Image (spheres, helix red, strand yellow):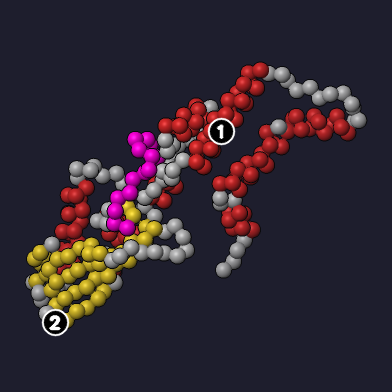
């Protein structure tokens, strides 16, 4: 595996503290005129004091910015973890901070985050959080019981290999990738189960009982820890038709 300089740079700056330190490199660019003014006067051995513009409004905005930024950072460090997956080991887990959006994590942090947003120093970019909330890996095993004969098949026996097949199975595993009305989610999952079982039974003539087992794990480390396997789908086939779901 080839590891380029850009790959190393991404690894080193992936964590937030490193990203914040990297932002400090912009200081010479933002304050280039002031820096060059100081350098030029030092080169001329000019002992006169460098006088920067005394703008009270700018000072006030600077103080306000530091206040909101410090408050938001402290809230992020001290408050309970608010970004948690809705689907963990077969159970629904909601954010620990109640009645506030996951954009902020609480009433106090809402205040500081809102102040930064008004000043144009924060934005609600939730794509990575949306991906992280649904960042699961799923193992699937298909078991056919035909009289006294028992066979096992991989996931490809039920859905095609690829992203589309993975999304179909996650929808009936309580992991939805798009917004679904809460009143319609059970109907949607039941419809997917009916369609999957009907497609699977089209290849079975003899009476066959089918069980689809699965296990989920959060993809948040290099060591995947799958929850206990559970039945995802159960039905019976005969004469190329579905008998029971």
Q: Which residue is tagged 1?
A: 69
Q: Residue at x 19, y 79 (%)?
A: 150
What is the spatial separation of the Cα atoms under label 1 and label 2, in whole angstroms?
A: 68 Å
Q: Is residue 158 visible?
A: no
Please identify the quarter of the rendering in which residue 21 is found: top right
Q: Is residue 38 visible?
A: yes
Q: Residues within 10 Å of mark 2 (few under 14, many from 20)?
A: few
Numbered mark located on residue 148 in the image: 2
> Of the residues tagged 1 and 2, which is closer to the observer?
1
Q: Earlier in the sequence, mark 1 or mark 2?
A: 1
Percent across and percent down for residue 43 are 88, 33
Percent across and percent down for residue 60 are 62, 21
Give SS at disc 2: loop
Q: Is residue 90 magenta?
A: yes
Image position of 232 (left or right of 48): left
Task: Report the residue that reaches farthest toward the bottom.
Answer: 148
- State which region is magenta: 89-102
């Amino acid at each position: 595996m080839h590891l380029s300089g850009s790959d190393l740079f991404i690894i080193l700056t992936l964590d937030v503290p490193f990203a914040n330190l990297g932002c400090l490199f912009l200081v010479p660019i933002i304050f280039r005129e002031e820096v060059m003014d100081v350098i030029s006067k030092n080169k001329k051995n000019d002992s006169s004091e460098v006088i920067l513009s005394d703008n009270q409004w700018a000072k006030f905005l600077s103080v306000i910015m530091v206040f909101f930024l410090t408050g938001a950072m402290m809230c992020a460090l001290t408050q309970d973890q608010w970004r948690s997956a809705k689907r963990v080991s077969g159970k629904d887990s909601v954010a620990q901070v109640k009645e506030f959006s996951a954009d902020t994590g609480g009433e106090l942090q809402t205040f500081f985050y809102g102040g930064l947003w008004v000043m144009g120093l924060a934005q609600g970019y939730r794509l990575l959080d949306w991906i992280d909330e649904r960042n699961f890996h799923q193992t699937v095993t298909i078991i056919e019981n035909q009289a006294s004969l028992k066979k096992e098949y991989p996931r490809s026996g039920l859905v095609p290999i690829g992203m589309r097949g993975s999304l179909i199975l996650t929808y009936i595993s309580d992991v939805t990738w798009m917004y679904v009305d809460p009143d319609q989610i059970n109907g949607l999952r039941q419809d997917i189960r009916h369609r999957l079982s009907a497609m699977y039974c089209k290849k079975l003539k003899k009476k066959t009982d089918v069980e689809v087992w699965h296990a989920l794990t959060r993809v948040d480390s290099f060591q995947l820890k799958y929850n206990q396997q559970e039945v995802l789908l159960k039905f019976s086939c005969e004469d190329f038709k579905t008998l029971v779901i």
